[in-house]
Image: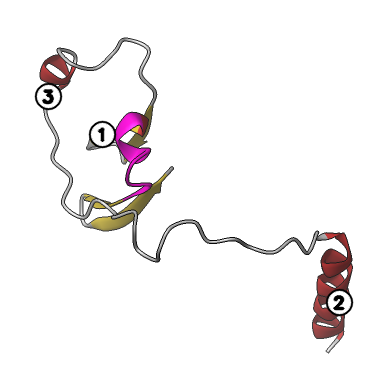
Amino acid sequence: MLSLFLLIALVQEIEKVIDRDPVIRVLPRDAIPAIDTPVFMEANIAAGFMRDDEIVIGVADGRQAKAYSTWMLDGHEIVNDAIGSTPIAVTW
């Protein structure tokens, strides 16, 4: 019971801090499509059209490593993928 009370008190304090500015929607829902079937290539091939200073998000599990271009994610924001059999969501 004490935990519930503390949680309620914490939420009330947070609500005092949060600015209550309205959320303005500029794009319709689902206007930015996720990438659900990403296509990968060898690094030496990607190097032919990626800049040397291009930022990527790297994900690895010790057996497999993948890099997701933030330039591509600027237009999609989410990649639904898997590392091995573990589903992941890469967000930007």
Residue marked by disc 1: 65
Q: Quadrant of the C terminus?
A: top left
For the residue marked with disc 3, what is the amino acid? Glu
Marking on residue 5: none
In the foreground, 25 or 58: 25
Q: Residue furthest bottom?
A: 1
Q: Amino acid at mark 1?
A: Ala
Q: Quadrant of residue 44?
A: top left
Where does residue 36 sit, x and y in percent of width and height?
A: 21, 55
Classify mark 2: helix, strand or loop.
Answer: helix
The CA span between labels 3 and 2 is: 51 Å
Residue 68 sits inside the magenta stretch = no
Question: Badge 2: few (under 14), some or many (20 or more) residues near its Cα, within 10 Å?
Answer: few
Q: Position of residue 60 (x, y in %)?
A: 32, 37
Give, as a single range, the part of the protein colored magenta.
Answer: 71-78
Please tell me which residue is depicted at 31% across the width and 41% down the height of the picture. 61
Looking at the rendered image, the disc whose residue lies closer to the viewer, 1 or 3, is 3
Q: Is residue 78 left or right of residue 38?
A: right
How far is the residue under mark 1 from the one under mark 3?
Answer: 11 Å
Q: Which mark is residue 42?
A: 3
**Considering only order in the chain, which callout, 2 or 3, is on the residue closer to the N terminus?**
2
The answer to which of 36 and 81 lies nearer the viewer is 36
Locate residue 58: give its quadrant.
top left
Residue 17 location, x and y as percent? 86, 60
Q: Which residue is mark 2?
A: 6
The percent position of residue 41, horizontal first and vertical second, equals 11, 29
